[in-house]
């Protein structure tokens, strides 16, 4: 394929994504702020100071997705892992420096968090357009929305105006992010700690309709779920046998498996349909259908009504994105997302 054809294809993809972002196939859900802690956030925050900011982010997300479809789930995950540690302040992006230990070293992020180079590229473009204006925390919120849209999911207005932390919290990243083996009560407690409720939990875990998990994240379900060398009885045995082919009892820890094996790159409601059929990959997903009548009913509802899932997911994403933002004169606008400004 010649260079001209490649450029043409890229332009077509970017143009299509731009249209989808502006006019998504689903309804663009509007949500409103109700707490004083986020009163200064606004969808129009950069309209005057950096009017092209959102278009720049959209184009880079589209290009990253074109080069690697897995990247959509990866950069969405960064936003989750950021907001659950001291609020949405881009602390997850900081590298270790001096006495500060990076959150990238926690069990939740080590060897699995990715997409930092994409964030670096977008931030560089934003700095060229509007120096020291768009925060890394807002950048994470925008790429999360755009990664959902490009996969066919809902769009929503992103409230902007967050500022960036000057420190990271390795302890917070270790303690506040659920693991694939967490119990439902543990996960709910972690969500409640962030001001999120059971409805938010069930809707936000629906993001696992895209993305992957490593073999090491679910192996115990296949071979030793209860500690008695028994497989997880809530896992469909045909599905389990298929998984065992690529995830043996030892070795191949890093082998990747789709969280949604039916439509792995499409943001839809198959996550919930899979749970109903006992084909959720992670234990922390399947328990939504097996350990609580209330969450089971939500799972069944979303499995039957994709529009309802999209609507609640959009609302819950806005709610999550508003966890303890730094605003006003708190924090800073980092010039490089990996480092605080005095280290640049």
Image (cartoon, rainbow, N blue to C red):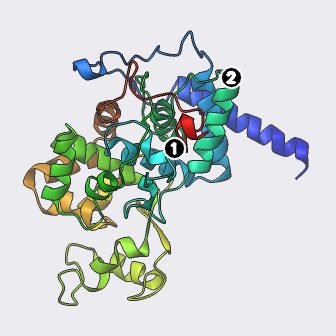
Q: Is residue 301 visible?
A: no
Q: Which residue is mark 2?
A: 129
Rendered residue at 46%/86% (across/down): 251
Disc 1 vs disc 2: which is toward the camera?
2
Rendered residue at 40%/83% (across/down): 244
Outermost residue toward the top in this view: 48
Q: Nearer the viewer, residue 96 or 192?
A: 96
Relative height, residue 247 to residue 50 (above, below) = below
Task: Decide: few, some or many residues near mark 1? Use Cα within 10 Å; few <14, some 14-19, many ≥20.
Answer: many
Secondary structure under tag 2 reads helix
Q: Position of residue 330 (x, y in %)?
A: 38, 25
Secondary structure under tag 1 reads loop
Whichever of callouts 1 and 2 sits on the residue coming sooner in the sequence is 2
Q: Which residue is mark 1?
A: 151
Q: Position of residue 338 (x, y in %)?
A: 55, 45
Task: Decide: few, some or many residues near mark 2? Use Cα within 10 Å; few <14, some 14-19, many ≥20.
Answer: some
Q: Nearer the viewer, residue 147 or 253?
A: 253
Rendered residue at 60%/15% (across/down): 51
């Amino acid at each position: 394929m010649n260079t001209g054809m490649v450029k043409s294809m890229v332009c077509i993809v970017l143009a299509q994504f731009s249209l989808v972002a502006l006019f998504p196939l689903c309804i663009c859900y509007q949500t409103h702020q109700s707490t004083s802690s986020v009163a200064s956030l606004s969808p129009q925050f950069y309209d005057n100071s950096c009017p092209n900011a959102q278009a720049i982010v959209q184009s880079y997300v589209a290009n990253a997705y074109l080069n690697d479809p897995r990247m959509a789930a990866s950069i969405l995950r960064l936003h989750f892992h950021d907001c659950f540690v001291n609020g949405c302040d881009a602390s997850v992006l900081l590298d270790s420096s001096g006495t500060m230990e990076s959150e990238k070293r926690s069990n939740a992020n080590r060897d699995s968090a990715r997409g930092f180079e994409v964030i670096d590229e977008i931030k560089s473009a934003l700095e060229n357009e509007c120096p020291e204006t768009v925060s890394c925390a807002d950048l994470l919120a925008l790429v999360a929305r755009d990664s959902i849209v490009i996969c066919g999911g809902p769009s929503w207005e992103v409230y902007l105006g967050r500022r960036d932390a000057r420190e990271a919290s390795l302890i917070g990243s270790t303690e506040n992010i659920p693991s694939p083996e967490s119990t439902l009560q543990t996960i709910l407690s972690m969500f409640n700690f962030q001001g999120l409720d059971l409805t938010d939990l069930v809707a936000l875990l629906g993001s696992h309709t895209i993305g992957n998990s490593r073999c090491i994240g679910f192996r115990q379900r296949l071979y030793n779920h209860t500690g008695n060398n028994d497989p997880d009885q809530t896992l469909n045995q045909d599905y389990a046998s298929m998984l065992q082919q690529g995830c043996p009892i030892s070795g191949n820890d890093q082998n990747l498996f789709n969280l949604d094996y039916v439509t792995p790159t499409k943001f839809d409601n198959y996550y919930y349909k899979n749970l109903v059929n006992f084909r959720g990959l992670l234990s922390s997903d399947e328990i939504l259908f097996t350990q609580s009548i209330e969450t089971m009913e939500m799972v069944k509802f979303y499995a039957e009504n994709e529009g309802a899932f999209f609507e609640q997911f959009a609302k819950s994403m806005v709610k999550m994105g508003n966890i303890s933002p730094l605003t006003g004169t708190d924090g800073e606008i980092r010039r490089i997302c990996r480092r605080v400004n005095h280290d640049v």
